[in-house]
Image: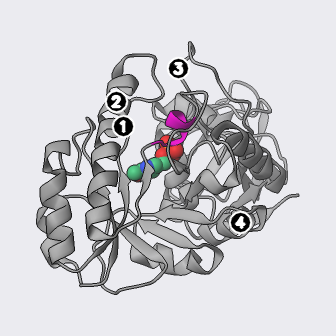
């Protein structure tokens, strides 16, 4: 069913670059949501932990449970607590949800500095802290999220300013409740936007995996893609001139040619929009429609590298590397190559 190959060297290289950029390993929180962007959450957690990373971020409790043994704390972005865990913290995304939290839960308050997806407004800070305290929760952080740190515009600056002003008020207020807060707003692009990191932590996902793409006018870190996707050959045949391959026969051989079918299809994350158009980095052309569990390519290689940087595949289908990675089948075989 295809193989995902992971480069530990590339991952360490990226961690070195990120640590250098933000001023130390201590400031890195690795984002491992959605199976670590398709890489395999436990594999990435283990390596990041060996490297010295102490913080992780996921979406669900189930994901946190899988990796918590590797970290001091796991921040859960998208689920309300069903338990009180000493090494979990939960992002509070609205004032209303506070009432549903179990007493004793550790939380981090999300401030809406301009993304306008979720979080409480800066002017609701006092009310939010009061509700958190009344509920018996322990606030351990204040966070926000940039909406356009990867593009050259003023957006990054005004969100940064709003967050900085809110940090000052929150620090003063936290003393009253006896809380010690950590502050974080940056994703990967945010972490590379300014020379120094003025927060306690950055939440890095795509840079860790080596697929960060900044605006061409912004400085681009020299990251390396960690993941490559490979297909294993199911069968080879000669397509005679005029014969067609796959559903609806959209590819017709102009002369006799060898084609092979590999064990990866759209059910495994190979977006069907690349049908009949994709060319691998080694110049091997995709032939015909991508099926649910297989796809055909020119040639007869036993194992075929489909891509070694998800951004290349993403460009062909009109999306971003994040989506290609996050949609990789959880059941694919995953192995380190170095
Ligand atoms: C996914 C996510 C991140 C990581 O973003 P990258 O661009 O992959 O670095 C950071 N913070 C939050 C809240 C996220 O949801």
Q: Residue visible at 52% across and 20% down?
A: 215
- Magenta segment boundaries in residue numbering: 186-191
SS for dot 4:
strand
Q: Name the residue at the right extreme.
A: 338
Which residue matches tag 3? 215
Which residue matches tag 1? 164
Residue 161, label in figure: 2
Decide which of 280, 164 is in the foreground and name it.
Answer: 164
Q: CA distance from mark 2 to mark 1?
A: 5 Å
Foreground mark, 3 or 4, reads 3
Q: CA distance from mark 2 to mark 4?
A: 42 Å
Which quadrant does the N terminus fall into? bottom right
For the residues bearing labels 3 and 2, Cβ distance under 8 angstroms: no
Marks 3 and 2, the one that precedes in the sequence: 2
x and y, in percent, of residue 151 in the image:
45, 22
Q: CA distance from mark 3 to mark 4?
A: 31 Å
- Magenta stretch secondary structure, dominant: helix
Marks 1 and 4, the one that precedes in the sequence: 1
For the residues bearing labels 2 and 1, Cβ distance under 8 angstroms: yes
x and y, in percent, of residue 20 in the image:
73, 40
For the residues bearing labels 3 and 1, Cβ distance under 8 angstroms: no
SS for dot 3:
loop
188 in the magenta segment: yes
In the rendered view, would you say 50 is above or below 231? below
SS for dot 1:
helix
Q: CA distance from mark 1 to mark 4?
A: 41 Å
Q: CA distance from mark 3 to mark 1?
A: 24 Å
């Amino acid at each position: 069913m295809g193989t995902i190959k992971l480069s530990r060297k590339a991952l360490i290289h990226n961690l070195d670059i990120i640590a250098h950029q933000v001023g130390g390993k201590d400031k890195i929180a690795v984002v491992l949501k959605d199976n670590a962007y398709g890489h395999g959450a436990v594999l990435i957690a283990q390596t990041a932990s060996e490297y010295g990373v102490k913080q992780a971020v996921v979406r669900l409790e189930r994901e946190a449970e899988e990796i918590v043994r590797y970290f001091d704390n796991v921040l859960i972005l998208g689920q309300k607590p069903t338990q009180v865990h000493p090494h979990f913290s939960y992002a509070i995304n609205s004032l209303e949800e506070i009432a549903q939290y179990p007493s004793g839960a550790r939380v981090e308050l999300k401030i809406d500095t301009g993304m306008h997806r979720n979080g409480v407004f800066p002017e609701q800070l006092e009310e939010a802290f009061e509700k958190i305290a009344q509920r018996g929760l322990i606030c351990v952080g204040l966070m926000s999220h940039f909406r356009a740190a990867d593009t050259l515009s003023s957006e990054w600056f005004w969100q940064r300013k709003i967050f900085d002003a809110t940090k000052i008020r929150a620090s003063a207020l936290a003393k009253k409740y006896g809380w010690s807060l950590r502050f974080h707003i940056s994703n990967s692009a945010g972490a590379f936007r300014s020379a120094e990191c003025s927060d306690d932590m950055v939440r890095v996902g795509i840079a860790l995996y080596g697929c960060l793409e900044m605006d061409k006018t912004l400085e681009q870190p020299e990251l390396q893609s960690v993941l490559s996707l490979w297909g294993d050959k199911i069968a080879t045949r000669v397509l005679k001139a005029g014969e067609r391959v796959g559903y609806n026969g959209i590819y017709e051989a102009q002369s006799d040619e060898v084609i092979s079918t590999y064990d990866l299809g759209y059910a495994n994350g190979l977006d069907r929009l690349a049908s009949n158009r994709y060319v691998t980095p080694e110049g091997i052309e995709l032939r015909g429609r991508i099926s649910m569990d297989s796809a055909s390519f020119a040639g007869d290689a036993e194992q075929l590298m489909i891509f070694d940087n998800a951004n290349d595949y993403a460009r062909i289908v009109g999306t971003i590397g994040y989506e290609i990675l996050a949609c990789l089948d959880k059941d694919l075989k995953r192995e380190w190559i170095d």
